[in-house]
Image (cartoon, grey):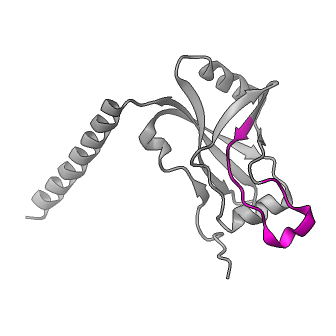
Amino acid sequence: MARDISTNKFAAQNRKARHDYSINGEIEAGIALMGSEVKSLRLGRCSIAEAFAAERDGEFWLINAHFPEYEAANRFNHEPGRPRKLLLKKKEVVKLVNATQRDGVTVVPLSIYFNERGRAKCNLGIAKGRRQVDKRAAIKDRDWKRDQGRMLRNRGGD
C-alpha cells in the first residue's frame, strides 16, 4: 500500500546539502509540476540528493531532481528526470543570478514540501562548497555544542 506523507512536513529533503555546503541564504520557490508529478511527490518518492538549480534564459530550473513515474497515470505520465521550472519573483531571480556569479557559489534544493494551501514549494539554499577540513571543523563544533548543553543540563539539575 502506498504511504501518504501529507502528515509529514517534507515531501523530499536533501540532508546531505547542509553537510557538503555552507548555506549562506535561503529562498522559497514554487515548482511547476504536472499532475502525475504531484501525485508521486505526495507519496514521498521524490529524490533531490543530486539536484541543483541553474539559470536558463532568465529563469531558474530544478535540474537532476528525480520524480519517479506515478503508476496510475498510465499514458499521461511524466519524464522522471526532466528539468522543472522554479517559480520565483524577478527580484529573487536577480539575487540568485548575482549570487551564482561569485566563485564557488551554487543553488541547491534543501527540501520540497507542501504549504498550507497544498502547493508544492522548494526551499533553495545559496551554498558554497565545503572542503573536507571545513566539514571536520563543523562536526567538531556541533559535537562541542551538544556536549556543552549536556554539561549545563546536568549541572543545573544538581
In the image, what residue occupies the spot 78% across and 66% down? 70
Name the image quarter holding residue 8.
Answer: bottom right
In the image, what residue occupies the spot 14% across and 54% down? 151
Name the image quarter holding residue 27.
Answer: top right
User: Magenta stretch containing residue 136, yes or no?
Assistant: no
Report the quarter where the N terminus lies: bottom right
Q: Nearer the viewer, residue 9 or 63?
A: 63
Q: Position of residue 157 (x, y in %)?
A: 13, 64
Report the quarter where the C terminus lies: bottom left
Q: Nearer the viewer, residue 68 or 148?
A: 68
**Residue 146 versus residue 139 in the image, above or below:** below
Left or right: 4 in relation to 35: left
User: Magenta stretch containing residue 67, yes or no?
Assistant: yes
Q: Position of residue 48 (x, y in %)?
A: 61, 49
In the image, what residue occupies the spot 74% across and 45% down? 30
Outermost left residue: 158
Left or right: 12 in relation to 16: right
Outermost right residue: 75
Q: Position of residue 102 (x, y in %)?
A: 57, 17
Name the image quarter holding residue 59.
Answer: top right
Picture mark count: 0
Q: Which residues are magenta?
A: 61-79
In the image, what residue occupies the spot 46% across and 42% down? 18
**Residue 21 versus residue 38 in the image, above or below:** above
